[in-house]
Image: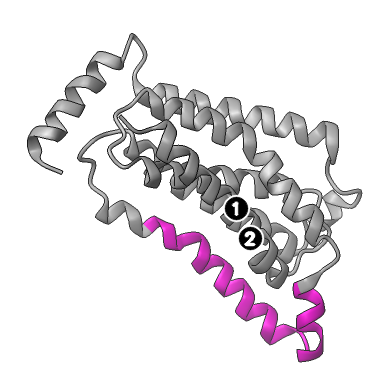
Amino acid sequence: MSDSTDKLIAALSTDRDVGMKPEWIFLLAVLAGTGLAALLFIVTLGPRPDFMSAMHTWRFVGKFVVTLALAASTALLVAQAAHPGAARGPADILLILAPALLLVAIVVELLAMPHASWMPRMMGHNALPCMASIPLFSLAPLALTLFALRRGAVTQPMRAGALAGLMAGGLGAALYAAHCTDDSPLFVALWYTLGIAFVTGAGALIGRRLLRW
């Protein structure tokens, strides 16, 4: 994209901004979306019965570490996506944080557990609820984040939408993790990833249409 086009979009972005800065709009959208998702989680699934005792196990805690790391690291990239010409290189490396943490957990799991248990742990007992719940709890964060991005000046709508979906998917997965009784990193690597990927794809498709100029 040419410099003149970037300057034009930046000028239009300034015209769009009425009072509140895009950064504050984005922050409020994420907080409101997360709050609505948490409320939906409480009235539908709620935490698992052994939540407090499970907090003493590394596998259960690890689910929150990975999913919240994904949401937090992606949030910075989503905020940058609303600004034309924002530097991508240094910040994009944050995207490897959550996968790296999950990879470490997988290695520990494979070393700690016998080979015969790997497949059962990966398949788990909650595959279908996982696949349904993560998109459900991601809906409000994704919708409000896309609304916030429309107040900015997105130059790559599909990428911005995908990043919004990735962040929302991380938040939705973190909420579902509080209910899910499958704690193995192998289960997380397969089913949580598929659920988040679905939300990411949906965000990309919606963003391509909703965020374009």
Query: Residue 40, relative to residue 116: is it above or below?
Result: above
**What percent of the width, then of the height, locates residue 153?**
29, 29
- Residue of label 2: 194
Residue situated furthest front in the rendering: 209
The quarter of the image holding the C terminus is: top left
**Would you say 56 lies left or right of 33 here?**
right
In the image, which residues are magenta? 94-122
**Residue at (51, 43) in percent of width and height:** 203
Nearer to me, 51 or 166: 166
**Residue at (46, 61) in percent of width and height:** 97
- Residue of label 1: 198
Residue 75 falls in image quadrant: top left
Nearer to me, 79 or 11: 11
**Would you say 16 lies left or right of 64 here?**
left
- Mark 2 lies on a secondary structure that is helix
**What percent of the width, then of the height, locates residue 181?**
84, 59
Query: Residue 18, relative to residue 9: is it above or below?
Result: above
Q: Are marks 2 and 1 in contact (CB under 8 Å)?
A: yes
98 inside magenta stretch: yes
Three-letter code for the amino acid on which mark 2 is drawn: Leu
